Each structure stands twice: as structure tokens, then as C-alpha cells.
Image (spheres, grey):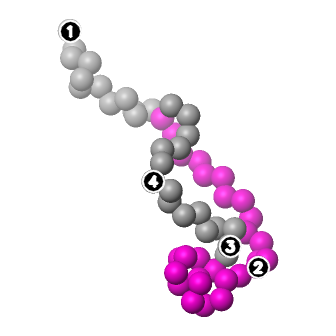
């Protein structure tokens, strides 16, 4: 009898496939704001709120 802890649960699974929507050059932040936010695009400014997300 083999120990089930020796199995690799990820064996045989495909790597993840990412969906990346096209980024349109629309509005941009000025240099100072962009450096504070880490992006020049307001659409990509997604601050971390410290809360859990997603369905569990």
C-alpha cells in the first residue's frame, strides 16, 4: 500500500493560462502621481486594501 502523501497532486495538470486584456493608452497620471501609485495608468491603479477577496 502506497502512502497518499507521496503523490504529487499537480502532476498531469497544465500550466495556467492568463487572460490579459488589451491596454489602451487613454488617460495618464503626471510624473509625481505615477511614481506614488507605481503606474502611469489610472485604470491599473488597484491599491491593496488589506482584505481578503474572492470566493471561499
The answer to the question of whether label 4 and label 1 lie on touching residues, with beta carbons closer than 8 A, is no
Q: Residue at x 76, y 79 (%)?
A: 27
Range of magenta residues = 13-40
Location of mark 3 (residue): 42
Question: CA–CA distance between discs 4 and 2?
Answer: 27 Å
Location of mark 1 (residue): 1
In the image, which disc is placed on residue 14?
none
> Which callout, 4 or 1, points at the residue further toward the start of the chain?
1
In the image, which disc is placed on residue 27?
2
Q: Residue at x 64, y 67 (%)?
A: 44
Q: Of tags 1 and 3, which is closer to the observer?
A: 3
Q: Quadrant of residue 31?
A: bottom right
Horizontal and vertical percent position of residue 48: 50, 60
Helix, strand or loop for the magenta stretch, by majority: loop
Q: Of tags 4 and 3, which is closer to the observer?
A: 4
Mark 3, other Cα within 10 Å: few <14 / some 14–19 / many ≥20: some
Give the vertical position of 38 relative to 47 (above or below): below
The answer to the question of whether label 3 and label 2 lie on touching residues, with beta carbons closer than 8 A, is yes
Mark 4, other Cα within 10 Å: few <14 / some 14–19 / many ≥20: few
Location of mark 4 (residue): 50
Query: For numbered disc 4, what is the local secondary structure?
Result: loop
Q: Of tags 4 and 1, which is closer to the observer?
A: 4
Amino acid at each position: 500500500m502506497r502512502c497518499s502523501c507521496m503523490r504529487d497532486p499537480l502532476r498531469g495538470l497544465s500550466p495556467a493560462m492568463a487572460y490579459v486584456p488589451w491596454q489602451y493608452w487613454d488617460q495618464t497620471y503626471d510624473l509625481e502621481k505615477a511614481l506614488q501609485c507605481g503606474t502611469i495608468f489610472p485604470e491599473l491603479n488597484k491599491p491593496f486594501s488589506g482584505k481578503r477577496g474572492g470566493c471561499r
